[in-house]
Image (spheres, helix red, strand yellow):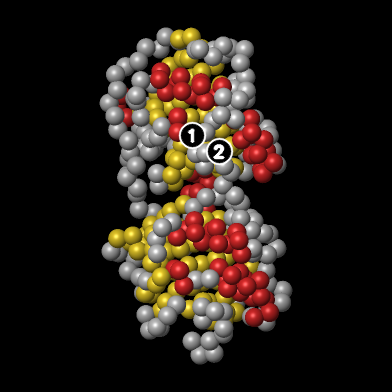
């Protein structure tokens, strides 16, 4: 992995902290973008958007970002940061080092960002919907409960996923948006509809899986501890875990492992059955006071079909795919 890494988002750090401690070290993703570029003059230039304009005005942030893309002269862009008065675009300059173009008060100024190497996936900022930045900030304030010193960023979230985020300072919680400006929902994994969304997020077009698991704490619903994850065989000897928590989009970890369970078709899993087991686990396990429940689906090597294991409070029950208890699993 590149020795020095330019990290552009609170979201990436959050995803790293949420990775399960039981997983082995993450294998490096090859995401470095490289493009030699000529030196650029540090001379400021006038913007077509006057200093008096507010970037919260509909359409203006999009225009300013388009100007910054043009000013970067085709260099690979790895980060965009916007607040009400300023926009900053970071690109890969000479020697894979970060440089920026900054719009402030109607002037675009080049900036040398230092000596750190850039190791991030580049993207086209013009493909992101920035037509109503004020609306994104309003939604983020409602979700996070804070509007203090809000900042919108576009950059790599995880494994080449480019997302928009809105953060606050002091930090409350990061709110995520897709490139169309739609908020990525927070999930209540005790609700079948939200559970189905979480499962689809981690399946991510993969039909055959090794393990599917959901953990929910009914005493703290929609917390970062609530999560759904799936293990898939990425390459021989490498297992990829795709994790979707209640509060952040899917992210990936990898570990070297030869699976002991058999791959199975994830379409045999009914989210409604998983949801019912989560909600009835205290009764099923005869543990009325427990709140944290984990439901796991996998197929042991000696089984002819996948099984569901429900665990909580040190007790567990094994069922078939319809949720019927297996007496002697």
Q: Are marks 2 and 1 in contact (CB under 8 Å)?
A: yes
Neighbourhood count class around disc 1 (C-alpha, 10 Å): few under 14, some 14–19, many 20 upward: some
Q: Compared with residue 275, is residue 174 higher up or lower down, i.e. above or below?
A: above
Q: Compared with residue 276, is residue 4 higher up or lower down, i.e. above or below?
A: above
Q: Give the quadrant of the N terminus.
A: top left
Give coordinates of residue 25: x percent, y percent: 39, 56
> Considering the numbered disc 1 on the image, is that residue within a helix, a strand or a loop?
loop
Question: Is residue 246 left or right of 290 when viewed as pictured?
Answer: left
Give coordinates of residue 31: x percent, y percent: 34, 42
> Considering the numbered disc 2 on the image, is that residue within a helix, a strand or a loop?
loop
Give coordinates of residue 138: x percent, y percent: 67, 35
Q: Where is mark 1, residue-wise?
A: 128
3D distance between C-alphas at marks 2 and 1: 7 Å
Q: Nearer the viewer, residue 63 or 304?
A: 63
Mark 2 or mark 1, earlier in chain: 1
Q: Can residue 29 be spotted in the picture? A: yes
- Classify residue 234 by image quadrant: bottom left
- Write the residue at 57% across / 65% down: 215
Q: Nearer the viewer, residue 131 or 162?
A: 131
Question: Is residue 152 left or right of 262 when viewed as pictured?
Answer: right
Q: Where is mark 2, residue-wise?
A: 181
State the mark number for residue 9.
none
- Write the residue at 58% across / 62% down: 195
- Write the residue at 56% across / 22% down: 60
Q: Nearer the viewer, residue 143 or 11?
A: 143
- Write the residue at 38% across / 67% down: 208
């Amino acid at each position: 992995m590149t020795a020095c890494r330019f990290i552009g988002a609170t979201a990436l750090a959050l995803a790293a902290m949420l990775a399960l401690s039981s997983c082995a070290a993450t294998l490096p993703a090859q995401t470095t973008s490289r493009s030699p570029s000529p030196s650029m003059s540090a001379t400021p230039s006038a913007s077509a958007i006057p200093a008096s304009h507010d970037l919260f005005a509909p359409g203006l942030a999009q225009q300013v970002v388009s100007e910054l893309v043009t000013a970067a002269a085709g260099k690979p862009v790895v980060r965009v940061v916007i607040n009400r008065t300023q926009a900053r675009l970071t690109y890969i300059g000479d020697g894979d080092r970060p440089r920026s173009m900054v719009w402030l008060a109607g002037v675009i100024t080049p900036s040398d960002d230092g000596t750190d190497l850039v190791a991030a996936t580049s993207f086209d900022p013009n493909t992101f919907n920035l037509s109503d930045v004020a609306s994104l900030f309003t939604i983020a304030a409602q979700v996070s409960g804070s509007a203090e010193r809000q900042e919108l960023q576009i950059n790599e979230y995880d494994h080449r996923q480019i997302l928009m985020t809105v953060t606050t300072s002091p930090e409350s919680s990061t709110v995520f948006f897709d490139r169309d400006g739609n908020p990525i929902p927070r999930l209540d994994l005790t609700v079948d509809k939200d559970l189905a969304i979480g499962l689809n997020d981690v399946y991510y077009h993969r039909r055959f899986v090794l393990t599917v698991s959901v953990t929910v704490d009914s005493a703290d619903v929609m917390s970062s501890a609530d999560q759904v994850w799936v293990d898939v065989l990425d390459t021989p000897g490498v297992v990829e875990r795709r994790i979707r928590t209640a509060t952040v989009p899917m992210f990936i970890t990898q570990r070297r492992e030869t699976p002991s369970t058999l791959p199975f078709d994830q379409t045999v899993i009914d989210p409604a059955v998983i949801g019912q087991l989560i909600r009835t686990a205290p009764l099923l396990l005869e543990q009325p006071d427990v709140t944290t429940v984990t439901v796991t689906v996998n197929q042991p090597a000696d089984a002819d079909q996948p099984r569901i294991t429900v665990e909580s409070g040190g007790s567990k029950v094994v069922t078939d795919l319809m949720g019927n208890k297996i007496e002697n699993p």
